[in-house]
Amino acid sequence: MDYLFIGLTAFGASMLTFFSGFGLGTLLTPVFAIFFPIELAVAMTAMVHFLNGLFKLALVGRHAVPRILLRFGLPAIVFAVIGAWLLGRVGNLPPLFSYVVDGRTFLVLPVKLVMAVLMMVFAAFEIVPRLKNLEFDGRYLPLGGVVSGFFGGLSGHQGALRSAFLARAGLTKEQFIGTGVAIATLIDIGRVTVYAGHFAKEGLSANAPLIASATVMAFLGAFLGNKLLDKITMTAIQGVVAATLFLLAIALGAGVI
């Protein structure tokens, strides 16, 4: 049942990235969190995102701009490692408090609360016009690498910040996409390296078949999404996805999942 549910969700989430504007990691992490501890959910999503990114890199990586990769990508990979390390540390902190509802005890964990807040913040980046249209001058590219890499490593949320800093870097559409994919891959390399060392014994190795199946379904979803409609955002779908993410974030922060 886990394979079926997560596989279908990976397929749907990957396809929705073409219509909703949300990234694969943003949509897939909450689903993994229903079945696994949130830290492991982030790590498992990172593996799917990384493998999916390699596929994209093979398609558009030739358009990446080396000077942008140096200024943005190098700080990003360093701070992705820092963010991933911090995730492991926060995950070891004891519960903040607990409460009982209908005889069932719920624990509010620091790592879940942090992830819930970040999920809501980055969901807002995709639906609030002022945040969605946020752009930074090209001279701040190294800072963009720092914040995008850090949050990419901590929670997997990197796309919105990356796009905001690359938007005014003087790139063509092809260069923007290729450079973005290359930077995302660098961030994934940094964080997956840390996750593998920290979570290998806790579930990554044991769930390798599940990760592989989710990756294949994500590939299929991306392929179908591209065939159905090429990179067009549908506001209605985006609103529903954002509302769902907010509800999942509240449930996660409250210790329900």
Image (cartoon, rainbow, N blue to C red):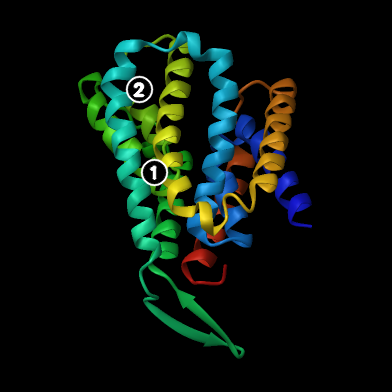
Query: Which quadrant: the C terminus?
Result: bottom right
Give the vertical position of 212 relative to 180 (above or below): below
Q: Is residue 73 left or right of residue 11?
A: left
Q: Nearer the viewer, mark 2 or mark 1?
A: 1
Q: Is residue 72 left or right of residue 221?
A: left
Give the vertical position of 162 relative to 170 (above or below): below
- Helix, strand, or loop for circle 1? helix
Location of mark 1 (residue): 153
- Helix, strand, or loop for circle 2? helix
Which percent across, then down, holds residue 71?
26, 20
Which percent across, then down, holds residue 198?
43, 53
Q: Residue at x 29, y 35 (%)?
A: 78
Location of mark 2 (residue): 166
| Residue 212, image quadrant | top right
Which percent across, then down, holds residue 19?
63, 32
User: In the rendered image, is residue 234 in sight?
Assistant: no
Q: Residue at x 20, y 21 (%)?
A: 139
In the picture as drawn, the residue positioned furthest to the bottom comes out as 103
Q: Residues within 10 Å of mark 2 (few under 14, many from 20)?
A: many
Q: Residue 13 got which mark?
A: none
Q: Residue at x 57, y 50 (%)?
A: 204
Q: Residue flagged by tag 1: what amino acid is it?
A: Gly
Q: Is residue 130 left or right of residue 185?
A: left
Q: Residue flagged by tag 2: what amino acid is it?
A: Leu
Query: Which quadrant: the N terminus?
Result: bottom right
User: In the rendered image, is residue 230 in sight?
Assistant: yes
Give the vertical position of 75 relative to 151 (above or below): above
Q: Residue at x 34, y 41 (%)?
A: 81
Label 2 or label 1, whichever comes before in sequence order? 1
Q: Residues within 10 Å of mark 1 (few under 14, many from 20)?
A: many
